[in-house]
């Protein structure tokens, strides 16, 4: 068998797809041909390295959180997500009231009493923020700055998130599935911006 | 509703690790793999009543993952494959390299170059290569997953391997000589 013929069927040899006669021919040739033997060894080594390529596993608690989100997203389809109320899943609540503030752009301070929630490490905790507005607001911009060691389930690696939404008149509930990774206490900052003004709120999050 | 949710979770949970693994190999990153699995779970939950009648759920779920990946490649394929660097990986690498730090470093470097090279291979070829040579899928399983005929898969795999070797030869990771002298073989055959 010629070198070129051997090279053409080396992969099939490694895949164990050759018949006995071909296997015998390849092995006989490789025994006496340094180049083809080296090629065979290198392809074999490449196969081993491919089979050993690392895989980064899912983030902690991902499967549980993903199943939970799949159920919630489907069951709540059709509802404006900003207006969903946690109900049975609510484990902790923080209430942020913005009554009247958005029509007063100069007033950017929040209450001196920062609400607090405590969440468990590596577990998804639903924290519901309630925003109350005197009037309906369209195209309000919501931004979240997450504290160090806290992530929003499903948004791993993101410490800031922003999106545009509508606020209805009255209470609006924002569900945050928070996951803690560091045992510490720090501040989550939520900002609401609208053509009529903006407002920043703080929530103390303690991870235990 | 709660019982329905629990039944869904019980049915799907045993397959999640395998689904995530497939999603990771298709997308190349934890972030995109999690997005892909999440999107599929949302889709599958909406069809949860059908699940109990599916005889082999694992391959069925695999097909849903693959189809979702193909439908929205631009979204899931945006993150290049990367070599992960957790302590566990380093330990695994050191074990593979017989505990030698130098060997482990060399192996990590080689793997990094392989991963970079994989990114340069046409996607339809890369998918077959990754599923067959990295994950160990049989052609029949890849056919069931992708719907692509086995003959076409074999052809794609052959081209993918050849392309990978060329790319690795360029950076010195792989040094197979394509100019193997036919006369050597002729002489040997004559012996």
Image (tube, rainbow, N blue to C red):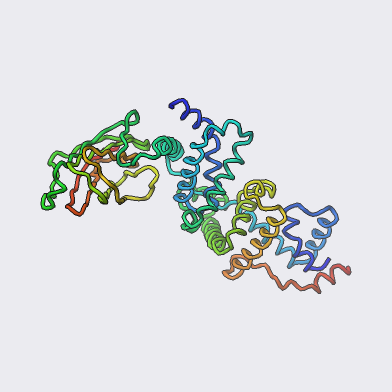
Q: Where's the N terminus of chain A, which quadrant?
A: bottom right
Q: Answer with left or right where residue B40 lies relative to residue A83.
A: right
Image point (65%, 57%), residue name: A45
Q: Position of residue B158 (x, y in %)?
A: 69, 60
Q: Residue A34's image quarter?
A: bottom right
Q: Answer with left or right where residue B161 lies relative to residue B68.
A: right
Q: Position of residue A52 (x, y in %)?
A: 58, 51
| A8 relative to A138, above or below | below
Image point (46%, 51%), residue name: B32
Taking the view exactly as shown, the residue that stands out farthest to the right is B190
- Judging depth in this view, the residue of A136 and A30 nearest the camera is A136
Q: Position of residue B157 (x, y in %)?
A: 67, 58
Image point (14%, 49%), residue name: A103
Q: Is residue A160 visible?
A: no
Q: Answer with left or right where residue A71 lies relative to residue A100.
A: right
Taking the view exactly as shown, the residue that stands out farthest to the top is B3
Image point (28%, 32%), residue name: A92
- Judging depth in this view, the residue of A163 and B10 nearest the camera is A163
Q: Where's the C terminus of chain A, which quadrant?
A: top left
Q: Answer with left or right where residue B42 lies relative to residue B147.
A: left
| A104 relative to A9, above or below | above
Q: Is residue A148 visible?
A: yes
How many labels, in total? 0
Q: Residue A35's image quarter?
A: bottom right
Q: Position of residue A63 (x, y in %)?
A: 46, 38
| A158 relative to A183, above or below | below
- Judging depth in this view, the residue of B48 and A10 nearest the camera is B48
């Amino acid at each position: 068998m010629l070198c070129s013929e051997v090279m053409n069927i080396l992969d099939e040899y490694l895949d164990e797809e050759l018949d006995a006669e071909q296997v015998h021919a390849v092995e006989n040739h490789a025994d006496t041909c340094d180049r083809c033997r080296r090629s065979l060894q290198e392809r074999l080594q490449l196969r081993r390295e491919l089979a050993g390529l690392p895989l980064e596993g899912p983030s902690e608690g991902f499967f549980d959180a993903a199943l939970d989100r799949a159920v919630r997203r489907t069951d709540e389809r059709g509802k404006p997500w900003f207006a969903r109320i946690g109900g049975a899943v609510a484990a902790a609540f923080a209430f942020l009231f913005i009554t009247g503030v958005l029509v007063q752009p100069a007033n950017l301070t929040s209450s001196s009493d920062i609400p607090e929630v405590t969440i468990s490490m590596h577990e998804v905790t639903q924290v519901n923020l309630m925003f109350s507005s005197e009037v309906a607001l369209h195209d309000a911009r919501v931004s979240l700055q997450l504290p160090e060691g806290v992530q929003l389930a499903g948004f791993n690696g993101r410490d800031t998130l922003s999106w545009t939404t509508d606020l209805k008149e009255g209470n609006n509930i924002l569900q945050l599935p928070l996951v803690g990774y560091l045992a510490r206490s720090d501040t989550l900052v939520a900002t609401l911006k609208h053509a009529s003004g903006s407002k920043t709120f703080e929530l103390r999050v303690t991870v235990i | 509703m709660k019982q329905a949710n629990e039944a869904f979770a019980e049915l799907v949970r045993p397959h999640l690790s395998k689904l995530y693994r497939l999603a990771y190999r298709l997308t190349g990153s934890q972030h995109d793999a999690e997005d892909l699995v999440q999107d599929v779970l949302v889709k599958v939950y909406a069809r949860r009543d059908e699940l109990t009648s599916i005889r082999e759920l694992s391959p069925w779920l695999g097909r849903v993952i693959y189809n979702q990946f193909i439908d929205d490649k631009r979204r899931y394929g945006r993150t290049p494959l990367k070599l992960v660097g957790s302590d566990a990986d380093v330990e695994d690498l050191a074990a593979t390299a017989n505990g030698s730090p130098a060997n482990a470093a060399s192996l990590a470097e080689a793997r990094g170059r392989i991963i970079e090279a994989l990114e340069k291979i046409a996607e339809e070829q890369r998918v077959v290569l990754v599923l067959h040579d990295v994950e160990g899928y049989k052609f029949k399983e890849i056919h069931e997953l992708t719907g692509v005929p086995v003959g076409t898969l074999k052809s794609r795999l052959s081209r993918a391997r050849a392309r990978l070797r060329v790319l690795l030869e360029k950076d010195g990771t792989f040094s197979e000589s394509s100019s193997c002298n036919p006369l050597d073989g002729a002489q040997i055959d004559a012996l």
